[in-house]
């Protein structure tokens, strides 16, 4: 067990070093960088499609998946460039995986880079990728107790995007309770209530992103 | 990297040994044991509540969570005994974690033991807990491409339970496509289409469980 913890700590330390390099790179390029984390199926790629429709060539996406390239294909079809990481079994992205994709992106004219992490509320939470902001997505079909169950993520998320709000009438999800629990973990967190089906809340989300500044 | 893979392989080998011990224990006790794996919020605990209502003292549950004991409380309230594992950050259960809970359960009269794994489609897939059957839950709100995206789980799952079928009219989820992809990965897989809200499909699920035999 002690050996396992040591290996994990040394993996984290090595990751932090690469994340710091990524941060320098992002700053040089004047990029605002988001790290999107959620359960599988909470709607990360649907939100990215809407963002690609809106930002077009001003947005670039690095999508992470265990395998398959569905997500990158969807983003490209919606109008933005995308590079795909296939982790082949690893349950989170690392800063080095992200760095390995820089050469595939043409960053001229790009202001916003979104890294779509592996669908998982646990492992991606503690790996810094060099982002400006960690964003947690939580679909209203998943249950309002998720912030308390996965505090490692919700402690670190600067923004929480509730998704699939169109399904709210059909499920038992107390938005006020979820917000309250998020605020206990991070009093500075910003909330967005969205539906990619109806378009609800997307304008507020885009406004928020517009106001974010690259690291100085 | 090589060091990391070696550590992972040795962790798996150690786990397999404990899983074999668990299997002997389960056989001695005449138990049918399920390992329930799904995304966070796909409805594992809701299904367990229905099973607890149905089986009462004939069912025991070991629930896994990163932290918090909500799930065990819900199962107990619904009529069955439950022991809770809090993994404090680990993203999957191990055979040893499960074994550490045997002392907390009174297995007299219990025929079915369900181990509710951590909500995660990646890490729990490859850790044997000594179960008879791995069961994957997939809610129709999550997207029908999940079997192809998470083959490590759907290769190993002997049963796939589609959940939240009451929401099917409100989402784009092609049940036929999901089934087809599951069958490509495991031609022997059994399917169940359920809703804990309406009760759809629960009788078929209970019938199936009734027909399962302890390891011989």
Image (tube, coloured by chain):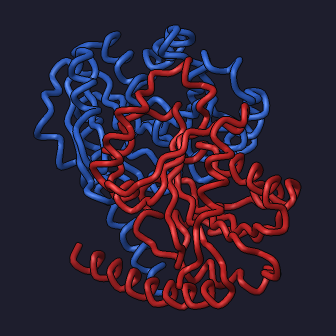
Chain colours: A red, B blue
- Left or right: residue A43 compared with residue B180: left
User: Looking at the image, is A153 positioned above or below residue A216?
Assistant: above
Q: Residue at coordinates 34% horizontally, 33% vertically from top-left? A: A177
- Left or right: residue A116 compared with residue A7: right
Quadrant of residue A195 within the rendered picture: top right
Res B31 visible: yes
Q: Residue at coordinates 70% horizontally, 27% vertically from top-left? A: B171
Q: Quadrant of the N terminus of chain A?
A: bottom left
Where residue A164 sits: x, y (%)?
Answer: 61, 34
Front one among B51 and A82: A82
Q: Residue at coordinates 34% horizontally, 37% vertically from top-left? A: B115
- Left or right: residue B133 compared with residue A97: left
Front one among A86 and B169: B169
Front one among B200 and A151: A151
Where residue B146 sits: x, y (%)?
Answer: 66, 44
Res B215 visible: no
Q: Residue at coordinates 62% horizontally, 50% vertically from top-left? A: A205
Where residue B4 sits: x, y (%)?
Answer: 45, 81
Where residue B174 sits: x, y (%)?
Answer: 77, 29
User: Looking at the image, is A16 positioned above or below residue A213?
Assistant: below
Front one among A122 and A162: A162
Quadrant of residue A106 within the rendered picture: bottom right
């Amino acid at each position: 067990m002690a050996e396992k913890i040591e290996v994990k700590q040394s993996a984290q330390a090595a990751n932090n070093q690469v994340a710091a390099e990524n941060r320098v790179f992002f700053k040089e390029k004047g990029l605002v960088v988001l790290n999107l984390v959620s359960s599988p199926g909470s709607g990360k790629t649907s939100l990215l499609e809407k963002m690609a429709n809106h930002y077009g060539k001003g947005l670039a996406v690095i999508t992470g998946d265990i395998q398959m390239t569905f997500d990158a294909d969807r983003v490209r079809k919606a109008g933005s460039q995308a590079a795909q990481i296939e982790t082949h079994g690893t349950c989170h992205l690392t800063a080095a995986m992200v760095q390995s994709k820089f050469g595939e992106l043409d960053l001229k004219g790009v202001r916003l880079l979104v890294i779509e992490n592996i669908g998982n509320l646990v492992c991606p939470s503690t790996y810094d990728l060099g982002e400006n902001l960690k964003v947690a997505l939580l679909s209203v079909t998943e249950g309002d107790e998720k912030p308390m169950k996965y505090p490692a993520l919700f402690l670190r998320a600067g923004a929480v995007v509730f998704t699939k709000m169109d399904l709210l009438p059909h499920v038992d999800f107390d938005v006020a309770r979820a917000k309250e629990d998020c605020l206990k973990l991070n009093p500075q967190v910003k909330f967005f209530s969205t539906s990619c089906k109806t378009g609800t809340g997307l304008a507020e989300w885009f406004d928020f992103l517009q106001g974010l500044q690259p690291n100085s």
